Amino acid sequence: MNNEWELKKLIVEIGHRIWLRGYVASNDGNITIKLNDDELLTTPTGVSKGFMNVDMIIKVDKNGKVISGNPKYKPSSEVKMHLEVYKERPDIKSVVHAHPPYATSFAVAGIPLNRCVLPEAVLVIGAVPTAKYGLPSTMEIPDSIREFIKSSDAILLENHGALTLGSDLLNAYHKMETLEHTASIVWKAIQLGNVNVLPENERDRLMTLREKFGMAGRVATCDATPMPSSTNSFGEDSKSGDTKINEQMIREIAEKVIAKLKNN
Ligand SMILES: [Zn+2]
């Protein structure tokens, strides 16, 4: 699978997939693959990632200068952000940047996606840090992500989107899927009125499992403290706590209504 043409074809396929899943709008998003220490493949700027072909993928050097490609297309304007990742993380071979709506909503709302909620997410993306807002295409974004990419393979970009890193393109893309899937479930649980966070001992068991599986990549340890305004009754009997309070409240309200009706 290391044939350059095949890697370009894979970028085209993943680009189509991120567009199809609504992770990008219009010409948003960018994908790179590191070929070696001096060269990488990048998506072009100003093109929908859903409608690329192999001819549009550009080869650049470690400074972002074009080595080869169709002169009609220019490299992604965010290539600096990708180069920053490869500089900091020699283990990373591919980077995906998109604006998946649920994850981006958290990045806009300023609510961190750092709690231990779903076992898969604890293992694959951990606590997702949010990098400070930076002006797209400038060095502000590489500067803002620098600290976080050292310890995490998934990063939210404040008021912008998300970035995932992988040992290959599929690995980086799957982290984007896990991130968006987790964000959508946490968002929905918030709408339902409660988010049960996995407790510390469960998180520790998952981290031990991660070590045992020899999982690649880096994850920041997720936060096992309850979400604000949640009851966090994880593992408790469903008849306890909140349910009891609700039943009691309903009974009290019913009694008051009956008393009022009697008085009439
Ligand atoms: Zn973007």
Image (tube, helix red, strand yellow):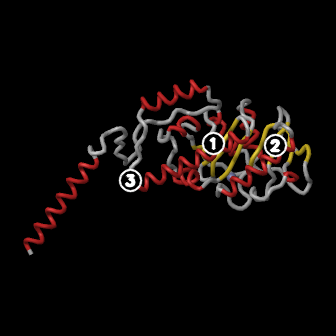
Q: Which residue is mark 3?
A: 193
Amino acid of disc 3? Gly
Q: Provide residue 82's location: percent of width, then percent of height.
A: 74, 42
Q: Which residue is mark 2?
A: 7
Q: Residues within 10 Å of mark 3 (few under 14, many from 20)?
A: few
Left or right: 199, with 173 as reference point: left
- The Cα–Cα distance between marks 2 and 1, rounded to whole angstroms, is 19 Å
Write the residue at 37% across / 48% down. Answer: 229
- The Cα–Cα distance between marks 3 and 1, rounded to whole angstroms, is 27 Å
Q: Provide residue 34's location: percent of width, then percent of height.
A: 79, 37
Q: Residue furthest left?
A: 263
- The Cα–Cα distance between marks 2 and 3, rounded to whole angstroms, is 44 Å
Write the residue at 52% across / 28% down. Answer: 207
The quadrant holding residue 101 is: bottom right
Q: Which residue is mark 1?
A: 175
Write the residue at 52% across / 53% down. Answer: 109
Q: Where 147 falls versus 243 (above or below)? A: above
Q: Where 118 falls versus 256 (above or below)? A: above
Quarter of the image with the C terminus is bottom left
Q: Mark 2 or mark 3: name the one nearer the start of the chain.
A: 2
Q: Provide residue 190's location: percent of width, then percent of height.
A: 43, 52
